[in-house]
Image (cartoon, rainbow, N blue to C red):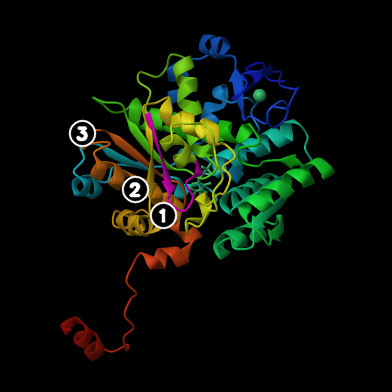
Amino acid sequence: MTKKFRGYQCSLCGKKYGPEEVTYVCPDDGGNLNVLLDYEGIKKAYTIEDITSSRDTSIWRYLPLLPMEDPGCEGTPLRAVGWTPTYAPPAMRKDLGMKQLWVKDEGRQATASFKDRASAVVVARAREIGAEVVVTASTGNAGAALAGMAAAVGQKDVIFAPKTAPPAKVAQLLVFGAQVMLVDGTYDNAFDLTIEASNRFGWYCRNTGYNPFTAEGKKTAAFEIWEQVLLAEELDKPLCVFVSVGDGNIISGIHKGFKDLQELGWLKQMPRIFGVQSEGSAAIANAYLAGTEEIIPVSATTLADSISVDLPRDGVRAVRAATETNGAYILVSDDEIIKAIAALGKVGIFAEPAGSTSYAGLVKALETGQITGDDPVLLINTGSGLKDVKSAMKSVEEAPVIKPAMDALQAFLNQ
Ligand SMILES: *Cc1c(COP(=O)(O)O)cnc(C)c1O
Ligand SMILES: [Zn+2]
């Protein structure tokens, strides 16, 4: 077992567990487990330059900060996850009246969503513990990412998704050769069934907000923001990171990444983390706005399928990501989410609804004065627009159909 991996600590009761003692959540209270690393040992063995001088342009450049050994698998998509581009679109900055604005595009991942970070790390972990089958519940992207990473390395996998998942995501699952079960119910129903199946058949469960390794994968986005923005740019004020929230595992993972860097003494200033939820799926924002960590389930209705969650599985840590960093939660409507797809499209970034949600949140935060044009902001687009073409078409006017003749074109242009 890797020495840098020290075990787990429950986010609710604080109890610590050894690396072999538990697998998923706290046996006492079901709390999400934080992975503990040997920060002193890492600090002694590595400098910032050891990380930043790496020529590996994937999440594996951060191997010294991950609770595992090198997974190998060279030459496969598993080695290509991460190091997504971070743009600074001048037109968008001008449009919003901002001094500094970046967009990190996770649509550029191997299977086109942020979820690759988690799935790559969980599949690496599965190989380390010799798991025969990996299983997950998914609204689509987590499954596509697991199916893609599993296919990359020849790992068996089973995916449970709601039968309402967008066709492009279901196509990915099938093409990657996963055993796919479409559940006649919600994501939450699929989630519970997955855990039962995992217990019954001994499958290794990747479920978001259940398997502690997903957040370890997702934290690599924070490391990239650190390298691509915090170390590279002059900032007068703390960076404000905007990210959409469903189960709350991405936002928790990003918070964990920044906390890891802080533990190592490698972070000058903790960024402020802003979670954005749809009004139609707002369980975590509701708790934050009520000033509590108690997550009360909702009946989710948003068209942003990737963040449509009744009972968020990583809600407590997700609330803390905002409260502990002087961030906030912001609510936006589905209408605003659709408009945001067009706004990102205008600067060449194609987002699915859950991806454009962060932009909608920024617009709202500027309107309400929660942040100003002086605050440096980084938006995360968590998934590609190709994942959900139906929603993309809602954000634009339909194209005209004309006869293939010059007079028809001329007539149309004269209108
Ligand atoms: C999963 C997902 C999210 C939300 O992540 P959580 O960990 O569930 O909060 C946001 N956007 C996209 C595209 C996703 O696939
Ligand atoms: Zn506990």
Residue topped by disc 2: 359
Q: Is residue 349 above or below residue 410?
A: above
**Which residue corresponds to the image point at 70% horizontal and 57% vertical from the top-left?**
177
Q: Locate residue 226 relative to residue 411 in the image: left or right.
A: right
Identify the element where label 2 is drawn. helix
Q: Is residue 397 visible?
A: yes
Question: Which circle marks residue 374 in the picture?
Answer: 3
Is 14 covered by the magenta stretch?
no
Magenta stretch: give its range.
272-283
Give amino acid for label 3. Answer: Asp
Q: Earlier in the sequence, mark 3 or mark 1?
A: 1
Give amino acid for label 1. Answer: Ala
> In 3D space, how far apart are the residues under numbered discs 2 and 3 (Cα atoms)?
17 Å
**Which residue corresponds to the image point at 43% horizontal and 35% vertical from the top-left?**
290
Residue topped by disc 1: 351
> In 3D space, how far apart are the residues under numbered discs 3 and 1 (Cα atoms)?
26 Å
Q: Locate residue 234 relative to residue 15 in the image: left or right.
A: left
Identify the element where label 3 is drawn. loop
Q: Is residue 410 above or below residue 120?
A: below
Q: Nearer the viewer, residue 37 or 233?
A: 37
Quarter of the image where one finds residue 313: top right
